[in-house]
Amino acid sequence: MADEHQFIEDGLQRSQIDEFFADELGRAGYGGMDVAKTPMGTQIVLKAEKPGMVIGKGGKNIRKVTRELEERFDLDDPQIDVQEVDEPDLNARIVADRLANALERGWYFRKAGHTTIDRIMESGALGAEIVLSGKVTGARSRVEKFNRGYIKHNGEPAQEIVDEGQGVAVMKLGTIGVTVKIIPPGAELPDDFEIHEDVDVEPVEQVAESEGVEELLEEEPEEIPDVGEADDEVEIPDETPEEVIDEEVVEEVVEETAEEPVGTDDVDVPDEDAVEEELDELDEEVEAEAEELLDEMEAADEADDEEDDE
């Protein structure tokens, strides 16, 4: 069998065993289980609010459950260890079953929800959420939520830290699903932080304040090093470039550029009279075409009138 199929079968078997325990041990306050396969057999750890009811008188009930596990689920030598839940109000599975039973007994959903979530927070939980979905009060189904404290809905903390449990309340109008999420006290969340007051902090060296603009302006400018000292071979002429240029050459260049035309010889400028004649001819042609179109339209209208008279 492939590994993927084996994982699917193990998960399906685990969910079926969980449903079996919920049906058989509901009155004992079933709070979940852990299954681990060992070389000696299958180790099952049960969490219950009333371990005595799970074991039964003289171990009668626990032997019955063990025998049914072997026959129904084909487990090799199942060994059941029953543990008592220290704080039932912090176990999401037990709280969900209690709330479902309260709804079945006729409690109003708001009163049951607020009372349950208050008991959870009084037990020290960091946060809790209760979701009721179904036909709570009328023929139309809806969802009601009750929140307290801080709760995680996604990511690794929601899978590892948050305790989640489901229950079902069977009512006359239909079933109501109960979902309870609890963050137990002392849970370490990724966004937690601590403030240490009595901690010796090393002194930080203070950087000198930068000088202002006025102080920089008051300071004397730094001396610019002589270029000749850096490179003796470089000779700088005494005269500036303006003095080197001959004034006569400049005057000749200015006169030549002033005498040269801008370059309008190559551009053909049309005559104004010719342009006006062309525009007049176009206007005459447009008027003639318009008159022809009017004549054609009038002839067509007359022909239509004659047909109507006939």
Image (cartoon, rainbow, N blue to C red):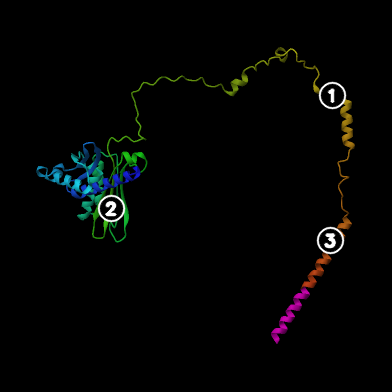
How far apart in space, not on screen, are marks 1 and 2 (Cα)? Answer: 100 Å
Inspect the image, locate mark 3, and give the three-letter code of the amino acid beneath it.
Leu
Q: Position of residue 229 (x, y in %)?
A: 71, 12
Whether residue 70 is visible: yes
Magenta stretch contains residue 48: no
State the residue position of label 1.
245
State the residue position of label 2.
177
| Mark before the other along the chain sequence, 2 or 3 | 2
Q: Residue at x 28, y 53 (%)?
A: 177
Q: Position of residue 246 (x, y in %)?
A: 87, 24
Dot 2 falls on a residue whose secondary structure is strand
Quadrant including the C terminus: bottom right
Residue 181 horizontal side relative to residue 213, left or right: left
State the residue position of label 3.
279
- Residue 213 position by quadrant: top right
Q: Position of residue 264 (x, y in %)?
A: 87, 44
Dot 1 falls on a residue whose secondary structure is loop
How far apart in space, not on screen, are marks 2 and 3 (Cα)? Answer: 90 Å
Quadrant including the N terminus: top left
